[in-house]
Image (cartoon, rainbow, N blue to C red):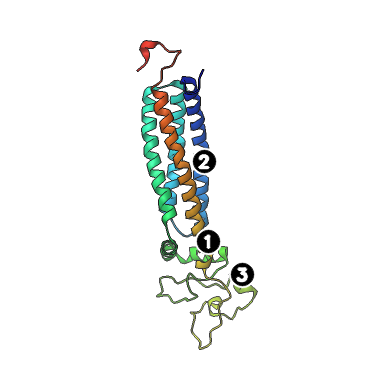
Amino acid sequence: MVCGGFGCSKNALITLNVLYIIISIILIGVAAYSRLAAIVVSLGLIGGIIACGVFLFFIALVGLIGAVRHHQVLLFFYMIILFLLFLLQFSLGCACLAVNREQEISLVRNGWRAADMTFKDTIQNKLICCGFEDVTLNKTDPLGHPSCDAVSCCTHDNTDAPCCKGEASGVTDDPVKCPCPTCLEKFKPRIHDAFSITGGVGLFFSFTEIIGVWVTIRYRNQKDPRANPSSFL
């Protein structure tokens, strides 16, 4: 049996679909971790990569069945959907990598504004930070935050700082500098890694789907030597 024949194409397609199942798990895992690492932001682009991973998992199962049975209808829909999935995953991967620092900060800022004080308090204690871009507690400020008196950076020292006592910054002529970093400082590397890693992984694996489409077209148009000649479509 020469490589490129029916048996070779069948085995290649089966192997590819097993690989797609593994890739889908990697995509879901990496994107889910990146979304969790971002914490405060609902990242639509990363959510799209997760959706692609879930969809790829089920499509790979369809392709696996179609490859084993040489099922013409399953293989036809499989290669069409796989190509559309490639376009979607490629676009999402490029979009994730194209997000610049200013857009990342804007996404986090919008997420912080939408969060309630209880959630902000949880974030401040988890990341050991105080406030978003400043230490103000001005209730008219949409980026306002709860008191940081329970955050470890306040409890260890500098408890006289306005941010630690639950007061607005700048209430005195010589305000004590807040000992805690802003939450934006903690968010920056997390949100950047979330987009970079997820976009890179999604973009890289999207090209394997083009190979799957090509192998499927080749395999679908080949004749099974064990089948009844009149049954070939």
Q: Given the image, on which type of amino acid does mark 1 rest?
A: Pro
Q: Which residue corresponds to mark 3?
A: 152
In the rendered image, the vertical position of residue 42 relative to residue 132, given as above or below? above
Identify which residue, 3 or 133, lies in the foreground.
3
Q: Residue at x 43, y 39 (%)?
A: 55
Identify which residue, 153 or 10, lies in the foreground.
10
Q: Position of residue 213 (x, y in %)?
A: 41, 32
In the picture, the quarter occupied by the C terminus is top left
Q: Position of residue 7 (x, y in %)?
A: 49, 20
Mark 1 vs 2, N-terminal side: 2
Mark 3 nearby-residue class (10 Å; few <14, some 14–19, many ≥20): some
Q: Secondary structure at mark 1?
A: helix
Q: Which residue corresponds to mark 2?
A: 25
**Drawn side of residue 184 relative to residue 106, left or right:** right
Q: Nearer the viewer, mark 1 or mark 2?
A: 1
The answer to which quarter of the image holds residue 229 is top left
Mark 2 nearby-residue class (10 Å; few <14, some 14–19, many ≥20): some
Q: Which residue corresponds to mark 1?
A: 189
